[in-house]
Image: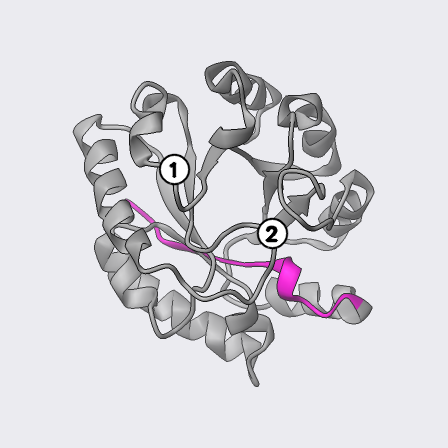
């Protein structure tokens, strides 16, 4: 069965209450924690390093979906796996030897993900799609939370779903950026499998109820 997942993004959490925020997600219907690692080079922001991911792993009762928005990600794959990453996603734009980097991730036992920036066509994945566990389509320009959803992502999602289905590949499609109750259903209809939700969850009056509502949307499409 193709299961659809909800992954609240810790980038939008209140860092002064991070343990409480993570416990809230633990007791919710969410499936993964999404962790954005930024280096100030690939994107114009700096967030979490290995030590913070390791601390998150100690608190997490759900898998850590670690999104490396960094240059030369191949240098840090082992460290993030040791820190507790269950999914490691690298950017196609940051990898000179993408196939080799995917192999590195898989060798650690983590699920291998590849992220695409808004301007990058899905066609760059044609020769590696059968080796990937996850494709993260950036529906905002990476680097900051709270941005508006780029609507062209819907067509891109449909194109990627067709590519995956044609290849009979197992890759899940993850949408990252500007996702909430207002567009969850249309994204799932377009072929998305994993919805990353940041501000729409952590900025909600009742985050647990918001996660439950997103999960209810996704459950309709499980098959």
Residue 157 within the segment the image draws in magenta: no
Magenta residues span 1-15
- Contact flag, marks 1 and 2 (Cβ < 8 Å): no
Placement of the N terminus among the 4 image quadrants: top left
Coordinates of residue 186 in the picture (x, y in percent): 26, 64
Residue visible at 77% across and 39% down in the picture: 50
Q: Which mark is residue 57?
A: none
Q: Is residue 223 left or right of residue 44?
A: left
Q: Is residue 90 above or below residue 131?
A: below
| Figure coloring | one colour
Coordinates of residue 41 in the picture (x, y in percent): 69, 38
- Decide which of 139, 181 is in the foreground and name it: 139
Provide the residue designation for mark 1: 120
Q: Secondary structure at mark 1?
A: loop
Provide the residue designation for mark 2: 143
- Decide which of 28, 39 is in the foreground and name it: 39
Coordinates of residue 15 in the picture (x, y in percent): 77, 65
Mark 2 Cα shell of 10 Å, populated few (<14), some (14-19), many (≥20) = some
Q: Is residue 118 above or below residue 28?
A: above
Residue visible at 58% across and 58% down in the picture: 9
Q: How many marks?
A: 2
Residue visible at 33% across and 62% down in the picture: 218
Q: CA distance from mark 1 to mark 2?
A: 16 Å
Residue 216 visible somewhere in the drawing:
yes
Q: Is residue 159 left or right of residue 182?
A: left
């Amino acid at each position: 069965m193709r299961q659809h997942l909800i992954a609240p993004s810790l980038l939008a959490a209140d860092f002064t209450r991070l343990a409480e925020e993570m416990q809230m997600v633990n007791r919710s219907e969410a499936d993964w924690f999404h962790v954005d690692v930024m280096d100030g080079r690939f994107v114009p922001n700096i967030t979490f390093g290995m030590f913070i991911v390791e601390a998150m792993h100690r608190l997490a009762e759900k898998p850590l979906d670690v999104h490396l928005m960094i240059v030369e990600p191949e240098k840090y794959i082992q460290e993030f796996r040791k820190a507790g990453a269950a999914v490691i996603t690298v950017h196609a734009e940051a990898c000179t030897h993408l196939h080799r980097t995917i192999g590195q991730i898989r060798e650690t036992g983590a699920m291998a993900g590849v992220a695409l920036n808004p301007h990058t066509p899905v066609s760059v994945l044609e020769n590696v799609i059968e080796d990937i566990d996850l494709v993260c389509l950036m529906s905002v320009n990476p680097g900051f939370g709270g941005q508006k959803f780029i609507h062209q992502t819907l067509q891109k999602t449909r194109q990627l779903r067709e590519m995956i289905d044609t290849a009979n590949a197992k890759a899940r499609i993850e949408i990252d950026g500007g996702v909430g109750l207002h567009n969850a259903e249309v994204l799932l209809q377009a072929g998305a499998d994993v919805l990353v939700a940041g501000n729409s969850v952590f900025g909600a009056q009742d985050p647990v109820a918001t996660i439950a509502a997103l999960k209810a949307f996704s459950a309709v499409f499980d098959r």
